[in-house]
Amino acid sequence: MRTAGRINAEALAAAYTAARPGATTADLNAAAEEVLKKYGVYSPFYHYPGPYPYPASTTVSVNNELVHGIPSKRKLHEGDIVSVDCGTVYEGFVADSAITAGVGQISPEAQKLLDVTRKSLFVGIEKMVAGNRIGDVSSAVQQYVESHELYVTREYTGHGVGRQMHEGPQVPNYGQPGRGMLLRAGMTIALEPMVLVGTAATRVLADEWTVSSQDNSLTAHYEHTIAVTPDGPMILTVLADGRSPWEVSGHHQEKTI
Ligand code: MG
Ligand code: MG
């Protein structure tokens, strides 16, 4: 899974770097796919069952689109924010991770959304310690996001990941401390805060895959696959040097909140 995670991080870094004004959402998918192809691996997203088999290796979701956007000829414009979610299967083991990138200069509102969503992921990861419960992770994400007057989705959740992309347990981005399944060393979980500016409500668009905020407000999504170990949480979806895919040089958007 660590190898799957490294390859996946490289694919997402390529998509992140490709997120520039004038690029299409299909260009971002192609950048990620090229990396998967180089390693001779594939994405579990391709032909994932749904209203119809999912047609691409990544999902690419722009602005109000929260998750599951289908890559297309849609062009990105200065000021857009674009989320890319990608999975990798390596020797039967799966890694799952997502990033959100600003396209050129973005508004302070959009920057705050990205910063809070990314930080909420790490606030949750800190709670992924053996002996804690899923609710400790979920509530930490929720409280951090809501303390910044943003909203977490109720309809889509993080999840166990391993031989399949979606395994138990579900890991919501909201919950109660001390509740839910006990975390034990050896568990591997995809934690993925999905955050909205306007309300928590979502709707599915006419293509039957893309999930938008119901009020069309901006949304963001970051995801890592993490192993619970005796020494604490270990993030598996990082580059060989330990950086997250959005920390690639020249396009780094880390800001202090
Ligand atoms: Mg994902
Ligand atoms: Mg996931």
Image (cartoon, rainbow, N blue to C red):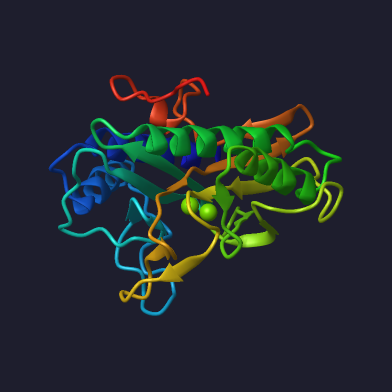
Q: Quadrant of residue 78?
A: top left
Position in image of residue 5 (x %, y %)? 49, 39
Q: Is residue 94 left or right of residue 160?
A: left
Compare residues 204 and 96 and report the one nearer the observer.
Answer: 204
Kindly identify the residue that appears in the image at 66 percent across and 39 percent down: 227
Residue lying at the far left in this picture: please name it.
Answer: 22
Would residue 192 be found to the left or right of residue 17 on screen? right
Q: Residue 75's spot in the image, x, y percent?
A: 16, 51
Give left or right: position of 232 versus 43. Answer: right
Which is more toward the observer, 182 or 8?
A: 182
Q: Nearer the viewer, residue 88 or 199?
A: 199
Residue at x-position 37% and y-position 55%: 64
Q: Percent x, y for residue 196?
A: 49, 51
Along the horizontal axis of the image, is 139 left or right of 93?
right
Pick whichever, 216 or 91, lies toward us: 216
Q: Quadrant of residue 180?
A: bottom right
Task: Relative to 13, say whether 33 is above or below.
Answer: below
- For the point 45% across and 22% down, the residue is 255
State how many labels appear.
0
Q: Is residue 15 depicted above or below 203 in this figure?
A: above
Q: Quick check: can you spot residue 187? A: no
The location of residue 254, given as percent across then percent down, is 44, 23
Q: Quadrant of the N terminus?
A: top right
Q: Is residue 30 above or below residue 210?
A: above
Could you tell me if residue 157 is visible in this image?
Answer: yes
